[in-house]
Image (cartoon, helix red, strand yellow):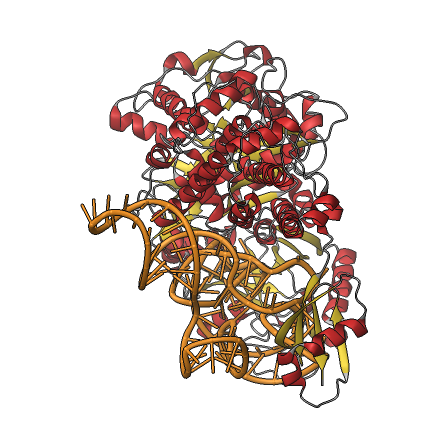
Amino acid sequence: MRNVPISLNRSYVPGDIEPAAQRFWEERQSFAAREIPGREKFYCLSMLPYPSGALHMGHVRNYSIGDAIARYQRMEGRNVLQPMGWDAFGLPAENAAIKHGVPPARWTYANIEHMRGQLKRLGFGYDWAREVTTCRPEYYRWEQWLFTRLFREGLVYKKNALVNWDPVDRTVLANEQVVEGRGWRSGAPVERREIPQWFMRITAYADELLAELDRLDGWPESVRTMQRNWIGRSEGLEIEFEVEGGAAPLTVFTTRPDTLMGVTYMAVAAEHPLAVAAAENDAQVAAFLEECRRTHVAEAALETMEKRGLPLGLAARHPLTGEALPVWVANFVVMAYGSGAVMGVPGHDQRDWEFARRHGLPVRQVIEPAGGGAVDLEQGAAVVHGRLVNSGRFDGLSSDEAFTALARHFEATGRGRRRVLYRLRDWGVSRQRYWGAPIPIINCPLCGAVPVSDEDLPVVLPDGGAGSTLEHMPEFVNVACPTCGGAAERETDTFDTFVESSWYFLRYCCADNDAAMTDERVDYWMPVDQYVGGVEHAILHLLYARFYQKLLRDHGLACDGEPFARLLTQGMVLKDGAKMSKSHGNTVDPQALIERYGADTVRVFTLFASPPEQSLEWSDAGVEGAFRFLKRLWSFAHAQRERVVMANAAAAADEFTDWRGLQASEPALGSLVHTVAGLVRQARFDYERKQFNTVISACMKLLNLLPEIAGPARRGNGAAVSARDRTTAAALGVLLRLLSPAAPHLAHHLWRELGYGEDILQAAWPRVEVDALALATVSLVVQVNGRLRGHIQVAPDADRGAIEQAALADPNVRRFVADRPVLKTVVVPGKLVNLVT
RNA sequence: GCCGGGGUGGCGGAACUGGUAGACGCGCCGGACUCAAAAUCCGGUUCUGGCGACAGAGUGAGAGUUCGAGUCUCUCUCCCGGCACCA
């Protein structure tokens, strides 16, 4: 039964018991998940790591949380799937290749080997048979396959686009990868370049992605808000303004058509055709456009960028009054949003107001606040909804009424229409990098872009060394066109790595299927019941993954609905107040900790130090504390080993038995069991709400209680198993189970050694007998006028009068009541009584 | 500026639907064991007063609702995170 002989007072050596427990799980395939129809499933997913070389504490925290949830759910009887994989494409592999002269593939696979070993050493219960490695052709072939379908459907397209160019990483970045005007990895100021790019039409799903956020009540509000803001839906009107001199009408989008009568100028972006045309005859304008192009990125992040601009010498006609409005080019107008032109309403838009003041344009009030009240347009714009004034026939309408009236007016005249605009842009997925999944397109001079046919998939990434680029591999590039057979060239861009991580959770359900992207097993496992990962993915990854779920659904490859039912975003790991990172030089190596204290201690500490969503302040002393706790449990278990083994042999004593008898014969022990029952309840409640710090706390309290339950050492080997022996065994059995999701190795070892059973993984969550919560007497707090003045013991069913009498019998209570009459008595059953005088 | 979250001992953090504020751990103080130290064990530890039972104050600030507020309402303040010329 045991691999290692155990002496009674052997000390706690995690380095012995942890690998033994891991071998046990591996031999039994304890975490292999099977689809069992009819049985309630639980899909517990942690964000897959990038194989950077070694685990860091952030990984350890993430996966300790995930594993605690998975193991708890298993105890609750659910059929648990907890997989793991590798987000294996990406820039660092190429950088490492250049730095160390190792091919990206070899570097990546070596890292995976090492990190997989680390995960196993931490004892996480993953189904390794489902492991997914995104840089393998077996994996990325399916995203290539899907891409060719999306291409035919028009859901992906290529266009010349101004892109964010990272001059250090020499690649295009998605908007999401630009942080404050700098590349998210390199930190270099981003430049703008025009390059042909592949895009995925995520905007086609914008409405659905937005609407479903409202129903994602298992997600943190903050993440939902971030996604809402990112999608940025605006309802408004598109209105055409005639331009004098025969140019095409100037179209603007506004969410405030009710302020239309307050328009005093028009403004267009520097890239707008009107501005570009004007620049041809106006050197000053040309210089301004050039300046905008140069400064756009560098200064965009500046909080107080001046509202600058120049008149273009053009006039637009107000669509209602025919008034001539000067057209300006302005640096605050963004070409990429709406039509790149805005109507200037300085009376009711702060930005327009600043521009108007600077350039001496008129400011006009056309809205008055609903409740009346003065408006001082000298101080700034009145950004309010209210009632229209100075607006001719619209005077007196509310802002909402005016919106509707103007929408009807323009729709009738054909000079405008209702429109919904999104901040969200289509997703640029092209990357000019070697270490990524090739985009499965062949560019033919005659046929244009042609998708690679199914039988030629996958387009395998050719072997490459340091500094490889696909462009410079003729054997990869030169290919016959699938349509005409003529000479053609492969696309040499690779996918953004966010493409791989957008559907890996579906692939885990059916990782062994080499005939299809997914199969019916996704219907069994999806959606993910609990997703755990860093909040830094609140927008990027989590939005793309939701998008992919819908894409796959529309191809019959996934079920309807959201991919992640519940989301837990774990907080950062800090040390000395700063995020633990290489750049701060404040990292703690998990490997060293595991070697010194064992996996259980590291796991218990990370769960105990703070609630999962909050940041975790690293503390070496705290780790020591966790280790001490496990050592104390170890030595208690061994001190009591003999009687516990006997009790367990006599009866399956993993539950409290004969509770009523115990309460009658040994009331003190009965009361302790009552406390244990309370801790079980608390721990369950806290596991459910994922507050693991208090779960660990409950386990510590239980351990502190155990010596009292066990009482003095058992005497005489021949003595029969006593009620106290049974109770000790039961209480320890409860503790082992409560703790097992956090410290699975120690729990596993003691469970077997003390004769509870073969495998604690088969044990169910401890049941709390309702009876065990009933006590002979209950303790009540006595307050006088809401202030604590004493404690009383009463029968659980004592009535108001008896309670009041008992309260007044307390000398301290009487002292504060003095001779005043009790006007009111508030009784909270089982808790307190408050005497109001 | 807008949106989201938060402010509780020396520290990390508890307090489930309003009901004993500070659980549990760390640290610190005292004691036991030891020639001594480490480890371990026992006791104490919000502040103020008191030998003590106990009393007073106390959850960022101020008001309010309530028999009773860390928890609910309003005003303010500070911190963290996200977004930001988005029309």
Asked if A460 appears above or below A589 in the picture, the reply is above
Residue at x 49%, y 36% (from the top left corner): A637
Residue A218: percent from the left, percent from the top? 65, 46
Asked if B87 appears above or below A659 in the picture, the reply is below
Closest to the observer, A418 or A360: A418
Whether residue A135 sits left or right of residue A767 in the image: it is left
Whether residue B85 sits left or right of residue B31 in the image: it is right
Quadrant in which residue A661 is drawn: top right
Residue A263: percent from the left, percent from the top? 61, 69
Residue A365: percent from the left, percent from the top? 62, 78
Asked if A119 appears above or below B15 in the picture, the reply is above
Whether residue A725 sits left or right of residue A600 in the image: it is right
Closest to the observer, A418 or A56: A56
Whether residue B26 sits left or right of residue A608 in the image: it is left
Residue furthest bottom in the image: A819
Closest to the observer, A298 or A188: A188
Res. A379 visible in picture: no
Residue at x 35%, y 18% (from the top left corner): A464
